Image (tube, rainbow, N blue to C red):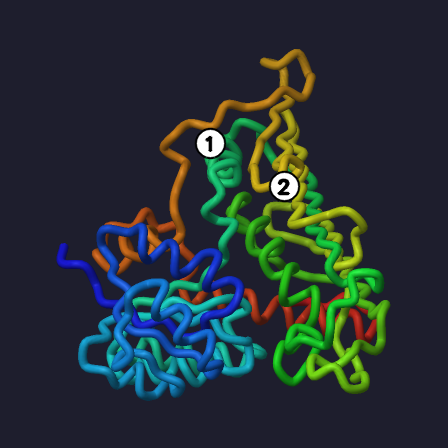
Amino acid sequence: MTPKKVGSVGLGGISSAVHLPGISRSPDLVLYALCDIDEKRLHERGEQYGVPEERRFTDYRDLVACPGVEVVDISTPNNVHLEIALAAAKAGKPYCVEKPVTMDTAEALTLAQATHEAGVKSMICFSYRYKAAARYLRSLILGGRLGRIHHVNMQYYQAWGLAEADCPLVWRYVKSVAASGALGDLGCHGLDLVSFVTGQRYEAVSAHLGTIVHERRLPSGEGKGPVDVDDFSNILAEMSGGISASFQISRFAYGRGNYQRMEVYGEHGALVYHLDRVPGVDELEICDASTGKKYVPAEIPVQFRVDQMQAFADLLAGEDDGLNASIDDGVENEKLLDGILAASESKRWVTL
C-alpha cells in the first residue's frame, strides 16, 4: 500500500521510545507532521526526523486539520486523549492513542460512539500485547496446553517513585491530568495483558490502593505540591472461566526498571512470563508433564515477534491479525479501572 502519512501529537518519553521510532521503521507509515506544546522539544524532534517547520504544530487542531495528515498518533498526557482522538475521528482520520484511553468510563464511551459513527479505525496502545513471550503464552493457553486455568498472578514493578529517586511532581502524580497513578500508568497494562493471554473478562474486583510519598518538589524547582494519586495498587479479581487473578502494581519496587512477571497455573501445567529480568528481554518458562514438571525456558517461535507500530499499519491496511486493542477494548479497560478505584475507596468487592 502507499505509506500512510502520520501526524504525531505528544513527543515525550513514550513517543520518543516507541511511537516515533516505530513509525520510522515501518515501510507502510511516514512521519508527516508533529505536534507538542513544548516548542523546544517539537523542533528537536522535527530536526531529528526530518519533518519540515511548516508541519510542526503547537496546537493539535492544526495538525488534525492539516490536509496531508491521514492518520493521528496520540502520546499525550491522559487528560487530553479524549479531545484529540475525538477531533481525529470527526475529521474521518484513524487514530492510535496511548493508555489509559481516557480519564474515565464516561469519556471512553463518548469516544467509542464518535469512533463508530465516523467509521474510523482505532488502536489503543497496550504495548505488552506485542511482546513475543506474551503472544506465545496466549497461543499456548488458548491452544489448551494447560487445560483449564485456575490462577493468574501478575506483578508490574518500577522504582522511579522511591523517595531517593527524587522524581518531581510530573503529570503522572496529578489526578486532574492522570486520573490515577500506578493503577492507570502500569496497572492497566497488566490488567489488559492478563485478559489478552487468557481470553477471559473481569467479573468482579477488590483492591487496596495507597500513596507512599504525599508531596513532591515542583518541576519549577520552587516549593512542593501534593501527590493525589496512588503509588501502588494490589488487586484481586474474579474472571470468567473460573479464573482467580491477583495483581501487585508499584512504582516503589527497589531495583526494578520495567519489571513484569506473570504466573499462569492450569490443571495440566504452568507458564511464567518475565519482562526485564534480563533488562529489556521478554522470556517464557513452561512446566508440565513434557518438561518433567520442571520449569524450563521456552524457545519462542519467530512468528510471535511483532512491532507495535507496524501492527497499527497493518490495521490501517486491513491486514492485521485481530490482536490489537480497539476503542471497545479501551472502554472495557476504563470500566475496570473505575471499578478498582471504587473497590479501594469502599473497601468492598465491586461487580463489573
Q: Closest to the observer: 44 or 194?
A: 44
Instruction: Say which residue appears at 54% left-offset and 76% top-offset.
Output: 77
Q: Are marks 1 and 2 in contact (CB under 8 Å)?
A: no
Secondary structure at numbered mark 1:
loop
What's the distance in space between the residues labelled 1 and 2, CA to CA? 26 Å
Residue at figure coordinates x 43%, y 85% from the top left: 83
Judge whether 236 appears above or below 303 on screen. Answer: below
User: Where does the N terminus fall, quadrant-wise?
Assistant: bottom left
Q: Nearer the viewer, residue 119 or 88?
A: 88
Residue 239 visible in the snapshot? yes
* Quadrant including the C terminus: bottom right
Q: Earlier in the sequence, mark 1 or mark 2?
A: 1
Q: Residue beneath label 2, please?
A: 276
Q: Amino acid at mark 2?
A: Asp
Q: Quadrant of residue 175?
A: bottom right
Residue at (34, 88) in percent of width and height: 61
- In the figure, is residue 60 to the left or right of 259? left
Identify the amino acid type marked 1: Gly
Give the structural element (helix, strand or loop) at label 2: loop
Q: Residue 224, labelled with which disc?
A: none
Q: Nearer the viewer, residue 132 or 115?
A: 132
Against 90, is 93 above or below?
A: above
Q: Nearer the viewer, residue 287 or 231?
A: 231
Give residue 225's quadrant in the image: bottom right
Q: Which residue is drawn at the image coordinates 26% and 69% (left, top)?
A: 32
Q: Residues within 10 Å of mark 2 (few under 14, many from 20)?
A: some
Measured as percent of width and height from the top left, residue 177 is found at 61, 81
The local crowd at label 1, few if under 14, some if 14 to 19, many if 20 or more residues have their Cα within 10 Å, is: few
**Residue at image mark 1:** 143
Q: Position of residue 320 (x, y in %)?
A: 29, 50
Q: Measured from the top left, where is residue 114 in percent x and y?
A: 35, 81
Mark 1 vs mark 2, foreground winner is: 2
